[in-house]
Amino acid sequence: MKKRFKALAAVLCTSTVFGAISPVLGAENGGSQAAAQLIELLKAKQIISAQEAARLVGKGEGADLEKTLAGLIGMLRGKALISNDEAVSLQKALVPSAGTDAAQKEVAAAARPEATPLLRDDKGFIERLRGQWVKGGYSGEEFDQMVSEKPDVAATIGRMRVMGAVSGDDADALEREYRSNYLSGAVGQMLEEKEKESLPLVRSAVSADIDEKIGSQFKGQWWKNVKLTGDLRVRYEGDFFDKNNAQIEKLDSNQQPFSPGQLMNTTNDRQRFRIRARLGVIAKVNDDVQAEVSLATGNTTDPVSTNQTLGDSLNKKTITLDKAYLKWSAAKSADVWFGRFPNPFFSTDLVWDPDINFDGFAVTYQPKLSDSFSLFFNGGAFPIQEVELSQHDKWLLGGQAGVRYIQYQNFIAKAAVAYYTFENIQGKMNSSNPANTDNDYTAPLFMQKGNTIFNINSLNGRTAKYAYASKFKELNVNGSFDLGIWHPLHLVVYGDYVKNLGYDAKEVSTLLDPADPVRDAQTTGYQIGLSVGHSDTTDFGTWKIFGSYKYLERDAVVDAFTDSDFNLGGTNAKGWIVGGSFGLAKNVWLSTRWLTANEISQDHELLGPSGPGPLSIDVFHLDLNAKF
């Protein structure tokens, strides 16, 4: 019922609707009563002043309804709530004497801008709903897409109720607030009071006409279902190294040492300016299918970074295909993803770098148990490396189950358990025959640093090629608690834990050197963090500060896909991350981070002349961000 009234209110000031309800307004007693109610509501909602309301009522003394309506039409025109053409149409429909000089003078007099319009628009209210949606654990981009597809406040609140972003009671309160404080709600209240008299007329005379007019107006306008999104980040980055750091060999894209024994930079501080640009198109294919294609800076050899470093003789920068997927809303609260899409799992950067996207197939399902409780299930199959000459393609299979509890503007709690298994990721030794390269494919296409690796060519004397010594079957448990009793300020506490259940110490030692003793497993990682401030810093004056401690052992996760900023990527590191952000203007904000990391184990697999030693790296980021 409420949605129906809000939909009617949105078109109340059109000639079609006024024409439809004119028999009610023109009734002998009901007309004056309805006009008086409308005037009082407009005055209560500060759309017209008390003086204007008194003037309108004065015109209607003696049941002179035509003068009241003429004055009201003029006043709406003067406040730019209706156009000139609409004012003329309304005069003809509601005021029989509209063609007379007297009636036209009434409209013209009332249209004079004697009072400042106090109509409040819906933008601020929509922003509040967006903040609550983000607080509920959903993305702001998803909210923007939802509103652009159906710009109706009641429908938006209903969707938030279904998705668990607000409870039933809170949704009802939001609807009441909207109806009480905004024009569409005020008129909706009047319609609700006059439902028995006006609704049959409105239903019969308006609905079909409006559908026909809107359909003909927007027919063939495909761009109404397309949304452009994007963001830009300009970064200063400082990388600071301990002068006593170990020297570590650098690998090329084939996981072979650079010739002649090129080393990673582990001792010389580095200053860089970097940019990240992303541009995407989201299209509504039909009621159930959405498509997105997104481009980003970066390259095709590094899956965990979309940065481009400035300072290459003013050369042009590389643009890559970052996302390309179809999302099918197969059922209520269930989506199926195909292609290359954002990370479907609830996670932190302990396991997955924030810039990583997933190839393959995923399913997300979020059943609602009550107004406050909901579950979520995420899973999928993701190809890591397709091997042309082998049936042993590398895959990631993942599943996650979690629970979400939401109490509107008080707190949100989320917890989840995930299991990720990497198939055929462990390296295999090539035979002693130098011509045998059958197992070369087991070397990964991309690594950062930290995992235990071995030379798969150690038996045949060919150039060294490195692969993972361990299997990876990662158990991940994480959660967050968002305390919003000081809304819009929030206190968020989060934690993450991961354990590689696929590590076999005896098997790893055999691959490295059968004569070595069994190595101790280093397969655990965790992160705890805290943030204080606004959930979103895309408005001027909004702010947030945060801090966390991270501990990630050598073989806890696949080093290729974890955070590329902490310790400049990879595993076998522990340390602190602190930072903050501040809104400079609408959709423009400044952010900064300091990441300080030390090695956990000094027994590096790839070493230069210095042998085993420490590895300490500090990283500073200062980012200017903008989005659209």
Image (spheres, grey):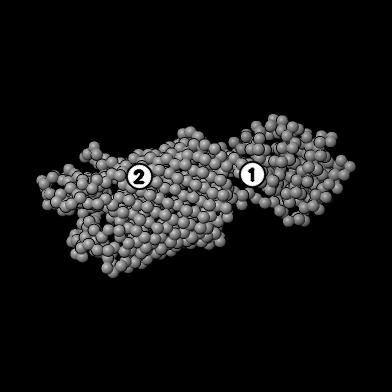
Specify whether residue 382 is in view.
no
Badge 2 marks a residue whose secondary structure is strand
Task: Identify the image quadrant of the N terminus.
Answer: top right
Which of the labelled discs sits on residue 419, or is there none? none
Crowding at mark 2 (Cα within 10 Å: few <14, some 14-19, many 20+): many
Specify the farthest residue to the bottom.
243
Specify the farthest residue to the right.
62
Instruction: Tell whether 621 sits left or right of 62.
Output: left
What residue is pinned by disc 2? Answer: 475
The residue type indicated by label 2 comes to Leu
User: Residue 603: x, y in percent?
Assistant: 24, 58
Badge 1 marks a residue whose secondary structure is helix
Instruction: Tell whether 553 sits left or right of 577.
Output: left
Q: CA distance from mark 1 to mark 2?
A: 41 Å
Specify whether residue 575 is in view.
yes
Residue at 37% of width from left, 66% of height from top? 238
Disc count in the image? 2
Front-lying residue, 171 or 108: 171
The residue type indicated by label 1 comes to Ala
Residue at 24% of width from left, 58% of height from top? 604
269 up-or-down from 407: above or below: below
585 up-or-down from 138: above or below: below
Specify the farthest residue to the left.
433
Front-lying residue, 215 or 279: 279
Residue at 43% of width from left, 46% of height from top? 346
119 up-or-down from 259: above or below: above
What residue is pinned by disc 1? Answer: 173
562 up-or-down from 585: above or below: above
Instruction: Tell whether 158 sits left or right of 266.
Output: right
Indicate which disc, 1 or 2, sits on the residue closer to the N terminus: 1
User: Residue 412: x, y in percent?
Assistant: 52, 47
